[in-house]
Amino acid sequence: MKQNLSGKINWWKWGLLLLLAINVAFVGVVASRLIQVREPSAETLKTTTAKSVKVGTFTTNKEQLNDTVATYLKDYQSKKFTYKVYAASSSILFEGSYELLGYEVPLYVYFEPNRLENGAVQLKVTSFSVGTLPLPESEVLQYIKSSYDLPDFVTISPKKSTITINLQSMKNDAGIYLKATTIDLVNDNFSFDIFKKKS
């Protein structure tokens, strides 16, 4: 094997190696730019199609809320069974009648309202009055469930002593529904988000 003892540097050899290194680096940079996604955030985000879009928010008070509920429930009254649902000073009140042996007995059910995570409003029975009859809560709610005409989005659970108003399940031609955000009887503040279903 011959060694270069003269100490001269072979510039052609080093020049070719340098040119080869530059070409490899250039090809590597171009290849990585072609493979790389232009918008990485689009790659990580899951494509979810929203079924509805929020179009606004409204706030109301007890008087306006009671007027709205009374107007809405007009279509659900019958000659035999009429009832009222309204916000009082510290509770939501259901006012109707209980029929026993052909006699009508005044029926008052008091509820504590709570907002659920899905935007529904849950009413929990706190007390009730059926004349002087000592009836269990579950029987009173079962009577309301079977006797009164209620909107489809209202669910009564006699065993849990609750009524759930599923505002997010309201059906109408406009495809609009509500989600409760604030239910505050004491401070007379009721807030709702308004959503529009996508067609």
Image (cartoon, grey):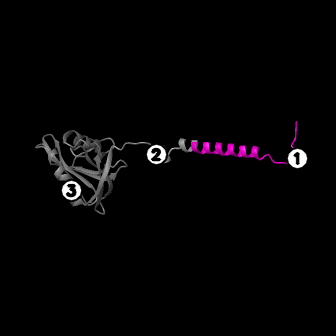
Q: Nearer the viewer, residue 149 or 48?
A: 48
Identify residue for label 3.
Answer: 66
Amino acid type, residue under disc 1 in the picture:
Ser
Q: Where's residue 78, x and y in %?
A: 13, 43
What residue range appears in magenta?
A: 1-30
Amino acid type, residue under disc 2 in the picture:
Ala
Q: Closer to us: mark 3 or mark 2?
A: 2
Q: Where's residue 84, x and y in %?
A: 18, 51
User: In the rendered structure, which disc, 3 or 2, sits on the residue that comes first in sequence?
Assistant: 2
Q: Nearer the viewer, residue 188 or 145?
A: 188
Specify the farthest residue to the top.
Answer: 1
Image vertical order of residue 85 relative to residue 187, above or below: above
Overall secondary structure of the magenta stretch?
A: helix
**Image mark for residue 6:** 1
Say whether residue 20 is magenta: yes
Quarter holding the N terminus?
top right
